[in-house]
Image (cartoon, helix red, strand yellow):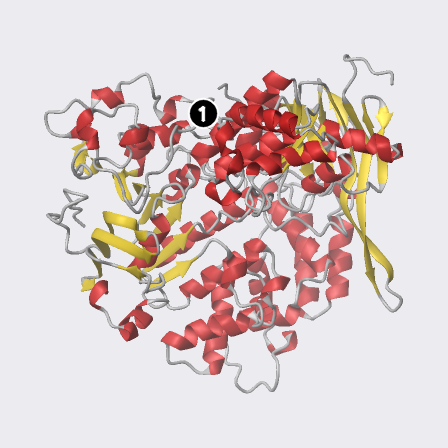
Amino acid sequence: MSWSRSEPIMQIENLEKHYPLSGGLLSGEVGRVKAVDGISFDIHEGETFGIVGESGCGKSTAATSMIRLEEPTGGQVRYKGKDITEYDSTELKRFRRNVQMIFQDPDSSFDPRMSIGDAVAEPLIVQGMSDRKKREAIVADLLERVGLSASDMARYPHEFSGGQKQRIGLARALAVNPDVIVADEPVSALDVSIQSEILQLMKELQEAFNLTIIVISHNLGVIREICDRVAVMYLGEFVEVANSEELFNDPQHPYTRALLSAIPTPDPRERGLGVELKGDVPDPSAPPSGCRFHTRCPEVIPPENLELSQSVWRDVLHFRQRVRDSTLNLDSVAETAAVEEGIDTDDIDGDISVSDVPAETVITQLRRENNLPTELADSTANETLDKAFDQLARGDLEGAKETLEESFMTVCERDAPVLTEREGRQVSCHLHDDVTTDGSMLEADQPVSD
Amino acid sequence: MSKQPSQTIGTDESTRSSNSLLSVSDLCTYFQTDEGVVKAVDGVSFDVQSGETVAIVGESGSGKTVTSESITRLFKSPPGFIPEGSIEFDGEEVNDMTVEELRTLRGGRVSHIFQNPQGALNPVYTIGWQLREAIELHQEVTKKEANEKAIELLTQVGIPEASARLGDYPHQLSGGMKQRVMIAIALACEPDLLIADEPTTALDVTIQAQILKLLKSLQEERDMAILFITHDLGVVAEVADRVVVMYAGKVMERGPVMEIFETPSHPYTRALLECLPSKGNLGGIPGSLPSPIDPPDGCRFASRCVFAQDECLEGPQPPAYEAGTADHVVSCIHYEPGGNPDIVLKSDATVSALDVDQMGVGGENR
């Protein structure tokens, strides 16, 4: 094996993990959930790399598929220069020793009927160490290194607190002397004061054993505390990869910015929670076109010649999205409008439909629900919206769809941005394109964040 | 509205303002178990005025959830019981209420929302059914009126096209949407007090921000008081007007939010603020919670406190001494009249929470 220490210990290239969705008459494949959709990064020996994102972004799947706990469906993972997807069973077993994982929930990652001495020794047995005395000596040493005592060996998991169990989890992972540890939400189930204890312990162990650590977490505070480099993940893709300090001090991607500003600061003078991201993470089986974040992005690039403030523009886009997905239920809007306006609906037979309620009332309700003012700053946008509202009030959803589609097309939706290197960090956002695909120049300066 | 803070935490001499919406004094909630009596809440006092947000903050095992459940006696009884203490809601003693009166109180003037909206919604009924049930339980309405009210409520909590959502089952909604539905159900009877027990802990930060904003705007519209239970000091700083810091069944410190964060006075509060990730001070608080069955004498935090002296290990939990202002009280002997609070306040062992840069503020150095 030709691997030198100057090269990355693990290289992940275009890693993909898609889950097929079956359905239909013959249970054929009807779609794919793209949990991880082409992520790439290198990690060097002794480094701590973090992957952060909201639930459902694919970060845990990324962790399990990069160490072949789940077979990746595409891409390459090279460990010390060799592709792990081509390993035979002996090589895989050796790899399993070199790479260990610790899990979020310390309660469910131990067998309640197995003493913790046996639990920590189990990886040693699996890897073929048959000498019981030797195993016990290793376990005793490990327990002391993680801050417990050797005499705890005979005790059972229920006798320990959550933080202590997580320590035992670390001891178990270290039993076979691994090079890499993958920690999936290692402290999320613990209290704040215990969290910092475990993070401190991970740092100490990393130095003592020269470990490479990959940390998966939704908690940016945890990531900031222990990671050297961080990748921010959204819907199966990395949107930004940077050094920890740089990322936190000067986030470049709008998603990173939004994520950072959504964290409540422990300072009552700084209330407000910054930019609000509307809506939930979209369905990963049908990710949005172009930039996957554009459906929630607070900084979508407007088409040229459109003069709207970013927040109004965002609301217009949001409205268009709902019309397009047909998640807009006109009859329901009409019924809600009738309730809100106190219109007497007793003489209507059956369900209320859009034709039973005056057009202005429906339009007022539509504007209210979608947060759109009656008069927009931009006259073209105004006309388009008025036309679309009229069509909707007549029940013509398709017509409104076309009207909106023509006028409000943005580069963020048309073209997928690529993760590009820029001053030592990688960002995937059209705001950082020097030239858009239209050929028009965009301001390269990043927009003023909140 | 005049605020007269109670003078004590652990004793019964508290003098309270008569117009508090909720006033809890010297509350104890114990649980009978095979190993002995677990003193989950052991002498807790605080007030909630109408329209304000009070946050109870503490780690797991501090008794914050049991405190909130005691207010409407939601805990299972037996084994739970309240040996002493009083809970007055709008001048009425909750401990003396009959089961029937408690039913009217719960979901009527006092509503709860919980951490896990998945577990709190019934999976086999539509959300419309569950909303209508909450409305019909406390109000005399026709089915049609209940339906209209349900639509109004969903619209108010930011769920668009409400009438179409009424037929949805809980599994068809995302976590954030489910929590919005829970809030709608809790608001069904226009409560005066909303008890929110870790309402955003199970949600992502971006969704948490949405829910916190929603709660704030609903509170302003309705002049509703919120009792917020959380372990997250960031959330406390975001929403609270006043803060109650709990540890091992006791109140350690109580005061206005600005003072708690600017001059945290109890050694426990200071240690807790120090532990926040991004404070650059790893290591946690050494030691562990004292036994809730046989708590030690003296201050409950003494065994983990760097400022503990011999007196800290004797007698009952220290009474609530004033720290700075009348509204800010601390249960620590260093604050007794004639004592020297600078031992704690000026110590190098702790740094004021606001001296250090916080998470999420781009462009600043640590």
Left or right: where does residue A337 sit relative to residue B22? right
Q: Where is residue B77 in the image (x, y as percent from the top left)?
A: 33, 64
- Depth check: give the residue in front, A15 or A87: A87
Q: Where is residue B106 in the image (x, y as percent from the top left)?
A: 34, 67
Is residue B337 visible in this depiction of the protein? yes
Left or right: where does residue A74 sit relative to residue B15? right
For the point 37% across and 62% down, which residue is it?
B111
- Depth check: give the residue in front, A132 or B8: A132
For the point 89% across and 66% down, which residue is it?
A26
Mark 1 is on which residue type?
A: Gly
Instruction: Identify the subunit bearing mark 1.
Output: B
Q: Is residue B278 above or below residue A411?
A: above
Dividing the picture into quarters, in which one does residue A213 lie?
A: top right
- Find disc 1 in the rendering and name its residue: B283
Q: What element carries label 1?
A: loop
Is residue A84 visible in this depiction of the protein? no
- Depth check: give the residue in front, A110 or A55: A110
Q: Position of residue A41 (x, y in %)?
A: 76, 27
Q: In this view, does A4 lie above or below A339?
A: above
For the point 41% across and 50% down, which residue is it?
B216
